[in-house]
Image (spheres, helix red, strand yellow):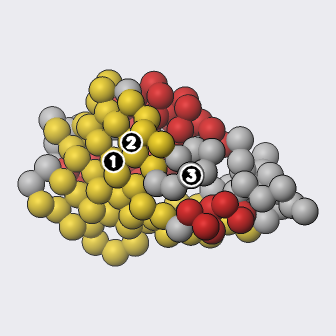
Amino acid sequence: MSTDPRTVVVDYVNAVARGDADAIRDAFAEDAVWTYPGDLPLSGEWRGRKAILEEFLGSIGGLIAPGTAVEVAVIGEPIVQGDRVVAEWSSRCTTVHGRLYENRNLGIFTVRDGLIVAVQEYTDTQRAATTLFANGG
C-alpha cells in the first residue's frame, strides 16, 4: 500500500471506477470525514469510515439504474501539497429515473499514513438535483 498522497487518491478514484468495494473501504481511515455541499438528500458531513461507505457512498448506489455501469475517471493531474491532494474526476451513469447523469467533481483530500482522513467535495449540486434526484416527471 502506497503512502504517497497522490497515489492514494488516484488509487481510490480508480477503485470507485472498478467498483472495488474492498479497495474503497481500505482507502479510508476509521475516523475519516467526508463533507458534501448543498442541500441535497446526501449533503452533509459524514464522520467515520462506516458512515462514509454505508450512508454516503452507499446511498448513491440507490440512485443508479440497476445493471448499468458507473463511469468515473480522474481528470488531469492532481495537485499535491504535503498531505493534501486536489483532484478532479468525472462521473457518468444512468439514474433510476432513466436520466443521464454527467458531472464533474473536485475533492480536496487529506491523506495521512497512506489513508484518506478527510475529503471536502465540490460538485454541481444543481445538476445532481435535476438528474440524480429528479422524479422523472
Q: Secondary structure beneath disc 1?
A: strand
Furthest toward the right, the residue is: 137
**Mark toward the start of the polypeptide (2 vs 3):** 2
User: Mark 3 or 1, which is nearer the eye?
Assistant: 3
The residue to which callout 3 is attached is 39
Name the side, left or right, on which 44 lies relative to 85. right
Depth order, front residue of 78/134? 134
User: Mark 2 or 3, which is nearer the eye?
Assistant: 3
The residue to which callout 2 is attached is 34
Q: Position of residue 40 (x, y in %)?
A: 60, 51
Q: Residue type at mark 2: give it.
A: Trp
The residue to which callout 1 is attached is 119
Q: CA distance from mark 2 to mark 3?
A: 15 Å
Identify the residue at image location x=28%, y=51%.
109
- Picture quarter with the N terminus: top left
Identify the residue at image location x=61%, y=67%.
126
Depth order, front residue of 11/79? 79
The quarter of the displayed image where residue 71 is located: bottom right
Q: How many residues crowd around disc 1 within 10 Å: few (fewer than 14), some, or many (20 or more)?
A: many
Q: CA distance from mark 3 to mark 1?
A: 18 Å
Identify the residue at image location x=84%, y=56%.
135
Q: Residue 5: which numbered mark, if any? A: none
Residue 109 visible in rendering: yes
Q: Residue type at mark 3: give it.
A: Asp
Depth order, front residue of 135/97? 135
Q: Residue type at mark 1: give it.
A: Val
Q: Is residue 109 above or below residue 79?
A: above
| Disc 2 + disc 1, Cβ < 8 Å | yes
